[in-house]
Image: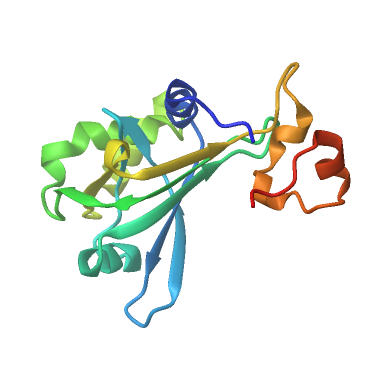
Amino acid sequence: MPKMSTAEVHAFLDEPAHLVRIGTTDDDGWPRVVPTWFRLLDDQVFFTPRHESVFLANLRLDPRLSLSIDEDALPYRKVTVQGTARMVHDVGEDDDWREQYRDIARRYIPEDRVQAYVEGTIDQPRALLSVPLDSSRVTSWRMPVGDEDGTGIWARRYFLPGTKLADRTGRGPIG
């Protein structure tokens, strides 16, 4: 299956407008997935939960999480991360990282509206968290591009004996 190189993953995560979907576990054991804004910087995914957000409370109890970033158009790139969130700045320290907040906002709203957005939400305290990619499990996938083999879109475990793709590729499941 086509995987992106580290450079392609970083380039994809650096593109504006993609949302990260953050998966945590509620205190009752139920999964929770929240889409939010993010920024890649220094091989870390940064995000900013508000003070009263449930997913921030979840991460305080258990910092393990899953991230999913994808796109709706070809080549349907996606990156998933299983890692541990790190508290960079806790709630109430917003003034210490306000410029990073502006940089995150710039990825999602026009430059001429960034300052107004930040000023309009400045009284909503947030935390700044990050997930370091170098200590996380990062996987990626995309559709084949150019002359790449179209049968490489799935992992071998999906090729059941006697199916069209298994016959076409001469590859059965890994046994």
Height in image: 107 above or below 49?
A: above
Q: Is residue 124 left or right of residue 81?
A: left
Front-most of residues 134 and 126:
134
Question: In the rendered image, which quarter is residue 24 located in?
Answer: bottom left
Height in image: 65 above or below 3?
A: below
* Model colouring: rainbow
For the point 21% across and 65% down, the residue is: 60
For the point 38% across and 40% down, the residue is: 38
Residue 70 at what x, y percent from top left?
A: 56, 41
Q: Is residue 43 left or right of residue 73?
A: left
Q: Is residue 5 left or right of residue 128?
A: right
Residue 126 at what x, y percent from top left?
A: 23, 53
Residue 101 at what x, y percent from top left?
A: 27, 38
Q: Quadrant of the N terminus?
A: top right
Residue 158 at what x, y percent from top left?
A: 71, 51
Question: In the rendered image, which quarter is residue 132 located in?
Answer: top left
Height in image: 6 above or below 116?
A: above
Height in image: 113 above or below 58?
A: above
